[in-house]
Image (spheres, coloured by chain):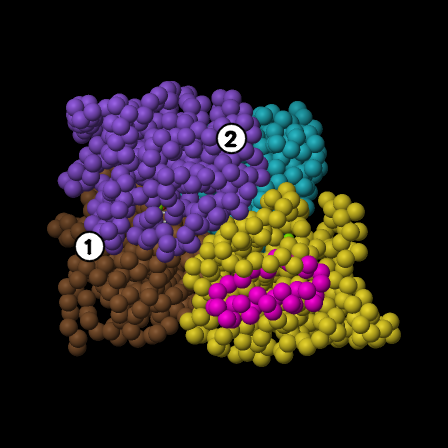
Chain colours: A yellow, B purple, C cyan, D brown
Amino acid sequence: MQQAPKTPPSPLTRLETMLLIRAYEHQLVELQKNGAPGTCTSVGQEACAVGVVAALESRDRIVTNHRSAGHLIARGAEPRRLMAEVLGRVDGYCGGRSGSLHISARELGVVLTSTIVGGELSMAPGVALAQKMGKGEPGGIVAVFFGDGAACEGIFHEALNLAVQWQLPLLFVCENNQWQAFVHRLETMPDNAIANWAKGHGLPVETVDGNDAEAVLEAAAHAIAHIRQGGSPAFLELVTYRQRGHFEPDDQAYVAPAELDYWRARDPIDRQVQRLKAQGLIDDNGLTALERQTQASIATALAFAQTSPWPAPETLTDHVYA
Amino acid sequence: MQQAPKTPPSPLTRLETMLLIRAYEHQLVELQKNGAPGTCTSVGQEACAVGVVAALESRDRIVTNHRSAGHLIARGAEPRRLMAEVLGRVDGYCGGRSGSLHISARELGVVLTSTIVGGELSMAPGVALAQKMGKGEPGGIVAVFFGDGAACEGIFHEALNLAVQWQLPLLFVCENNQWQAFVHRLETMPDNAIANWAKGHGLPVETVDGNDAEAVLEAAAHAIAHIRQGGSPAFLELVTYRQRGHFEPDDQAYVAPAELDYWRARDPIDRQVQRLKAQGLIDDNGLTALERQTQASIATALAFAQTSPWPAPETLTDHVYA
Amino acid sequence: MSTMIQMTAAQAINLALREEMRRDPDVFLMGEGSATKHRDLVDAFGPDRVRNTPLAEAIIAGTAVGAAASGLRPVIDLLFAPFMTYAMDALVNSAGKLRYLSGGQFRFPLVAMGMTGTGWCVGAQHNHNIEAMFVHTPGVKVVMPSEPADFKGLLKAAIRDDNPVLFFIDLGLLCQEGEVTEDPDFIIPLGKAAIRRSGDDITLVSYAKTVAVCLQAARQLAERGISAEVVDLRSLKPLDENTVLDSVRKTGRLMVVHEASGLCGIAAELAALVSTKAFPSLRGPVVRLTGPDAPIPSSWALEQAVVPQPERVVNATLELLGAAHSVN
Amino acid sequence: MSTMIQMTAAQAINLALREEMRRDPDVFLMGEGSATKHRDLVDAFGPDRVRNTPLAEAIIAGTAVGAAASGLRPVIDLLFAPFMTYAMDALVNSAGKLRYLSGGQFRFPLVAMGMTGTGWCVGAQHNHNIEAMFVHTPGVKVVMPSEPADFKGLLKAAIRDDNPVLFFIDLGLLCQEGEVTEDPDFIIPLGKAAIRRSGDDITLVSYAKTVAVCLQAARQLAERGISAEVVDLRSLKPLDENTVLDSVRKTGRLMVVHEASGLCGIAAELAALVSTKAFPSLRGPVVRLTGPDAPIPSSWALEQAVVPQPERVVNATLELLGAAHSVN
Ligand SMILES: Cc1ncc(C[n+]2csc(CCOP(=O)(O)OP(=O)(O)O)c2C)c(N)n1
Ligand SMILES: Cc1ncc(C[n+]2csc(CCOP(=O)(O)OP(=O)(O)O)c2C)c(N)n1
Ligand SMILES: [Mg+2]
Ligand SMILES: [Mg+2]
């Protein structure tokens, strides 16, 4: 079943992937302006996706949520098939039935995506249990991505408790992007709540700068080593920021401009560019070339998606039952 | 609406109440053997009920669960009306519609009893919010009783988070009686989980010997003072033991005899008797007299309940809608 | 009489909330983003009465139940209907049962709002018409309006009702405009259907945005000389049995049209109602035109295939009239 | 042929689990107290495959969904049907929809068991027949057996099915005995009703313990010269439409009897089915005899008033036959 890509080997690859994610999502924003279905973009959170996914192996599984483009692309999903899915076309990963909100790509080990906040957390322990009971490739683990808002749902604790109690090979990855749709995190939970709550369950918890791809990778690799060794879960809180609205379109009128400025100044892509420049691994020309290449690949993807056929109405009830 | 009893003033009164609870529940056990509906008794947990309720005032509210006889009787509920309810008769607190599992007595401030584990926790914040928004008597608080098992339900955390976030006058009372129906607590959660989980929410948490009525009262009074002063919630874990089965009948074949012995040796009623004897507040004669008086009142209650009429079938759909 | 103004269903909801909050200090609103979304209500009534909540539907609904039993009148916004699955214990086991189980000790005046329906290509985890589940649930009421005036009038009635009311909002109607009275005393009583068009040959029953589909079909049928009566249920529970029965007793034929899937749905209930209570009047089989027994797909092409279209209503009517004639 | 043995429905469930766990190493059982209750299965298959869970229905069901999609075949015991309200997201939004929304990428071979029904005076928070909610839910199947042989045969079929199956257990049947085959290959296919008694004058359709009520009524009716056919649905979804339709085409009359409340319930679905697809054969109104639209009370006196009794079935039949004659 598995044909997941090899782990992107270098910081430069991670920059490339982040550029691709951003270009892909910017394209979706443009499409939405022209009437395509809206999406939840992950602009500003790309380092979380590339950092964690870089630490995973092909035998591992990912369970994710509504804000999943980064996880999918970092895992090797083709932008053209993602875009076709968002547009509801047959060549999408789910034949157009999902749209943007619940894209799974089983061939990449991205399974059971749910747009019900907390749905990802409810299913991930079962995927991990199956790994543990011998259903995946030996030693495989599961990474579940969810938001700070999801931590407010009771299922967050039920999943943590089960994972700890049953010693499941499960990495909890909370992308704390400060916002829960139209409500700021601090309006719904105490500061530091996520890490404190997780610690109450007695598993290893680390809070990391989620806008630093290399820091995320390092923390994820460390947590995953713990999981593979002991067969028991671990928890990462990635502190990051949702730079765009909750869903396209969303004018973010409810966000303080200073907050946006603060976080835009900490953009994960800029950060990676600066790091690579400082290390002499890229220069302005190289960056421009990369960006151009990314744009081109997105343009190709778009053409593919837009010409992909609509699913036939006769297929409406296909795949309801196995 | 409120006619709750005055706070039982003395340790001796608490002994009396515990004896009454136990005699009442033993009577239910006998009734069940003769074909009456089964109940969840609180034998062994009486100190939790009398200790906490002694610290409450009539302006306060109680929200409780399936194992509620102690809370009700400590609050002044009449055994005869409780027994009538268990037997499904019109003179029961709920006219026979509840049976033993969800008895509310609004006139005593015991509201919204739920036998859905976690149901009590889901509703208690709303009762506390109403108090805070001026619906009860000024300064009233809410005490919600629930088990160690209920702490496994996600709603436990949702309730805690909301109570903390909204600064609700709510006392969480977890009666950790070691068992969750037919599963031991340690099979479902780490040791010390309840206090650790609660602490993660950042409210005051105290773990108390739940078989010591005076210790419970003291801790409850302390927590309630905090709530009344600051208008914010507090948490008590009462460590106790369910001496009988989950539900009558239940032969407890799954319980290690040594465990039962251990806890029977720590019976809360014996403890209170010894304390009172040591203080010279009761002697064997006094105790015998008390027990006899209790037996007599239960016998009267039984006669009342058994002669109370059945509800008329024509009333079947009364009270579905307001 | 008070003036009529043109507004969208979304504005009608806001107006209903504003009027009821002004009328009754016990009414308050909470939900994930309620304060963000209704900033004007926060300004008017203060942050205690318009609350953003944590992202946790179970405790939102449970808190509403507890508050309602204690004298407040909460309105909760659960956003999309499928999210109500997290709130089912509070809605079904507490709000629906605890009045009864307590022998009438408590009332639960609360309103739970949820959006659903096709039109936004959001897929089955946002778009799932689960109103029938709550019609099947004892102790609660269910409404689902079809036009701005009803959004206002029914929401106000729901807020004033002493029972839990599920208020379903068909997404496709939110931006649609209509005439709404400014009269703050105007309510639409729960349990009253509306005859949107009179007719003699067939009764088309529907609710929410599918009412417009039936009206369109009725106009097309009129061109062929067929006179269809269109009934808008408005309340799904209590159901206005008499309006439906009277109509079918007149027309002799019933077709129920809705987007929700058919099995144990509203159309099933109406078919049963009529075939038990108006059987002698029936001149042909009852027809159900509903969404398929399938989750709702996101793809526009497939989502459109879910929606009962006027043509389907027209064709099914023509077929029924033919069949009915041959049967009688 | 293999031997028949006498056993209770509870034993039949245990036997089905044992046989399927022996046959297929991917089958495993979990729930609050599953290992405590099925100590013999723990002994036979080890603690990994018979698990006590934390007291948390949402994660039990969610874990089953995740495990099922990953190649295991979980059976979960959710104890009492009303507790499923905590598991609704996993059952409705995940198990029921994610195969479809993923374009067929996943299968969800899982069974969720829940008890319900009158007889134990436990009240509406334990006793609530919510099977219709799941019949209305796309992507899942629903069964509710009436006798020990079916408990075994249907549970085995449910475990072997590649889709989520809700397996409802009528409390009142658990201790009832019946003949059960020891043949480990004997299954009862999902979606097949059983004709428990043939007859010509009326079709009585039911399921679970109410089948016995219909059979009793049928015997009483026979004494009056009325011949009732009794159909036991067994599967509520998929529903064996043909067996019901064929029967009504023969008898011309349909009465549906169940304990669950009527609004948008199984009886509504069958009334709709018949009044749409067998209308010309109907010789009188469809009759629904169901539990009231009310929570189930605990008091024995009231609980008994909820249960459709044979006398009600007999009387309603007599009335219907009279009415039908006067109508025709
Ligand atoms: C159960 C549920 N409630 C509400 C929503 C609507 N909703 C979608 S995303 C979202 C915010 C989620 O916040 P968070 O978990 O922090 O993730 P983020 O969107 O910030 O990535 C909300 C409220 C939903 N999809 N599911
Ligand atoms: C949601 C739900 N799940 C399961 C049950 C069945 N049940 C009733 S009490 C109980 C154990 C509860 O344990 P705990 O919370 O510790 O309370 P205790 O019974 O020990 O007082 C269980 C599993 C229930 N009533 N509700
Ligand atoms: Mg967030
Ligand atoms: Mg316990």
Please identify, in this view, whether the residue under mark 2 or under mark 1 is nearer the observer: 2
Say if B243 sits above or below D211 in the image. above
Q: CA distance from mark 2 to mark 1?
A: 50 Å
Q: Is mark 1 within 8 Å of ligand 2?
A: no
Q: Position of residue A179 (x, y in %)?
A: 66, 50
Residue A72 belongs to magenta span: no
The residue beneath circle 1 is D175
Q: Residue at x 58, y 75 (%)?
A: A57
Nearest the viewer among D5 and A259 is: A259
Q: Residue at x 50, y 71 (%)?
A: A229
Classed neighbour count for the residue bearing mark 2: other residues with Cα under 10 Å, few (<14), some (14–19), many (≥20): many
Kindly tell me whether residue D267 is visible in this rendering. Answer: no
Image mark 1: chain: D
The residue beneath circle 2 is B227
Q: Position of residue B23 (x, y in %)?
A: 21, 32
Nearest the viewer among B275 and B131 is: B275
Kindly tell me whether residue D217 is visible in this rendering. Answer: yes
Which residue is outermost to the right?
A285
Residue A229 belongs to magenta span: yes
Circle 2 — which element?
helix
Quadrant location of residue B305?
top left
| Quadrant for the C terminus of chain A in the image | bottom left
Image mark 2: chain: B
Q: Which residues are magenta?
A: A209-238
Dominant secondary-structure state across the stretch colored magenta: helix
Circle 1 — which element?
loop
Amino acid on which the number 1 mark rests in the picture: Cys
Amino acid on which the number 2 mark rests in the picture: Ile
Side of C118 where D192 appears, left or right: left
Q: Is mark 2 within 8 Å of ligand 2?
A: no
